[in-house]
Image: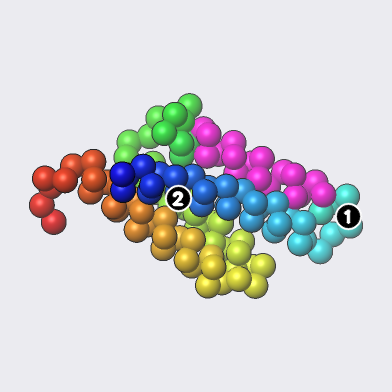
Amino acid sequence: MIRGLGLLVIFLLELAVLATGARWGWSLDVPTAGRLLAALAVPLLLAGLWGALGSPRARVPLRPPVRYGFQASWFVVGGAMLALLDHPWIGLALVVVWAILIILINRTKNPNRSA
């Protein structure tokens, strides 16, 4: 049950990063057309990267350490965008919650593993 709940929360965090990308794109100091383009392009770029490299069904399968590195970078970018939107603590919380959940999920995969 912990694993399922953790995966659900991680999925919601992924959606939050995509929404943050749209909000960050809209906040750029450019004309409205550029803001609209950025608000659409940033989450599409993030989603494409996640689908190609970070998701469990990624088109380019990565070994777990590399995949976790990519995922960590992806969430750090989301946290950085939140910080740029004047929400640094929420950005930090996003990254920390993701990291804790990954640790918990990996522990539930192999509960007999010693610390």
Most frequent secondary structure within the magenta stretch: helix
State the mark number for residue 32: 1
User: In the picture provided, is 51 more to the left or to the right than 65?
Assistant: right
Q: Split into 4 quadrants, where in the image is the C terminus?
A: bottom left
Provide the residue span drawn in magenta: 36-52
The residue lying at 77 percent from left, 56 percent from top is: 26
Q: Considering only order in the chain, which callout, 2 or 1, is on the residue closer to the N terminus?
A: 2
Nearest-to-viewer mark from 1 and 2: 2
Amino acid tagged 2: Val
| Residue 31, x across and y down, in percent | 89, 57
Q: For the N terminus, which image quadrant?
A: top left
Q: Which residue is mark 2?
A: 9
Q: For this view, does 47 lie left or right of residue 57?
A: right
Q: Of 56 and 37, which appears nearest the observer?
A: 56
Amino acid tagged 1: Thr
Among the 4 quarters of the image, the one containing residue 86: bottom right
Rendered residue at 40%/30% (across/down): 61
Residue 56: quadrant of the picture: top left
Instruction: Please name the residue shown 52% across and 48% down the image.
Output: 12
Q: Position of residue 63 (x, y in %)?
A: 33, 36
Toward the viewer: 8 or 49? 8
> Is residue 66 at all visible to an observer of this figure?
no
User: In the image, is 48 to the left or to the right of 33?
Assistant: left
Q: Which one is nearer the viewer's eye here, 51 or 13?
A: 13
Q: Position of residue 77 (x, y in %)?
A: 55, 56
Q: Residues within 10 Å of mark 2 (few under 14, many from 20)?
A: some
Question: Residue 42 in magenta?
Answer: yes
